[in-house]
Amino acid sequence: MNRSGFTLLEVMIAIGILAIGIGAILVAENNSLDTTFRAKRMTTVATLARNSLIEAEREIQGKTFDETRKELSGKFDPPYAEYSWERKIKEITFPNVLTPDAQGGGKSGQPEDQNEARVVRLATQFLSKATREINITIKWKDKGQDQEYSVSQYWVDLNHEFNLSEQ
């Protein structure tokens, strides 16, 4: 008996294999679209953060730290109205970088070089008073969850008064 064509079982197996293949392609494509969307979102967020840092720098330029607001927040204009931002300016305190020997912990108990220790203390005090950390946080909702992205920049006011008296 000569049979030409496929049996119902062979057709069902072929359709099953085809369905699994198409399903795998659809899952891969969906993951690719999600990754592309996340990359676009992060590019937008990074650009908004960079622009916010530039705007903060322009606002601070030429002013003393006391003349600037320590905290500020707002929303972006359309088409970025779904994003909000916060800016915080914090004081930086530099640690005492002197070693015990430089502070006077030499073998005799006397400072080995008081001038060096004084210069380091004055420089540390100056940098602590002249440096601020600017932190920008971008916030948005994604799939019902709060998301945020933060960047920091350090601002040094080189025009800050250099006080030679130790405090």
Image (cartoon, rainbow, N blue to C red):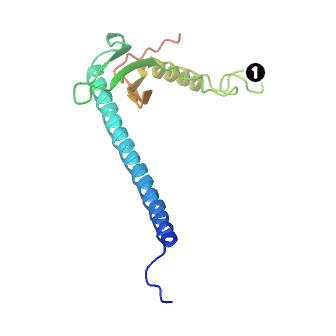
Residue found at the far left of this picture: 78
The amino acid type, in three-letter code, at marker 1 is Gly
Q: How many marks?
A: 1
Horizontal side, residue 156 vs residue 10: left or right: left
Please determine whether, in this image, residue 40 is positioned above or below residue 123: below
Q: Which residue is mark 1?
A: 109
Residue found 46% across the figure and 23% down from its top:
127
Residue found 29% across the figure and 21% down from its top:
75
Q: Position of residue 102 (x, y in %)?
A: 65, 27
Q: Position of residue 21 (x, y in %)?
A: 46, 62
In depth, the one of 11 and 60 nearer the eye is 11
In depth, the one of 37 and 59 nearer the eye is 37
In depth, the one of 130 and 75 nearer the eye is 75
Which of the 4 image quadrants contains residue 15? bottom left
In depth, the one of 129 and 104 nearer the eye is 129
Q: Position of residue 143 (x, y in %)?
A: 41, 32
Please determine whether, in this image, residue 73 is positioned above or below residue 47: above
Which of the 4 image quadrants contains residue 83? top left
Please determine whether, in this image, residue 101 is positioned above or below residue 72: below
Horizontal side, residue 8 vs residue 155: left or right: right
Callout 1: helix, strand or loop? loop
Residue found at the far bottom of this picture: 1
Residue found 52% across the figure and 22% down from its top:
124
Residue found at the far right of this picture: 107
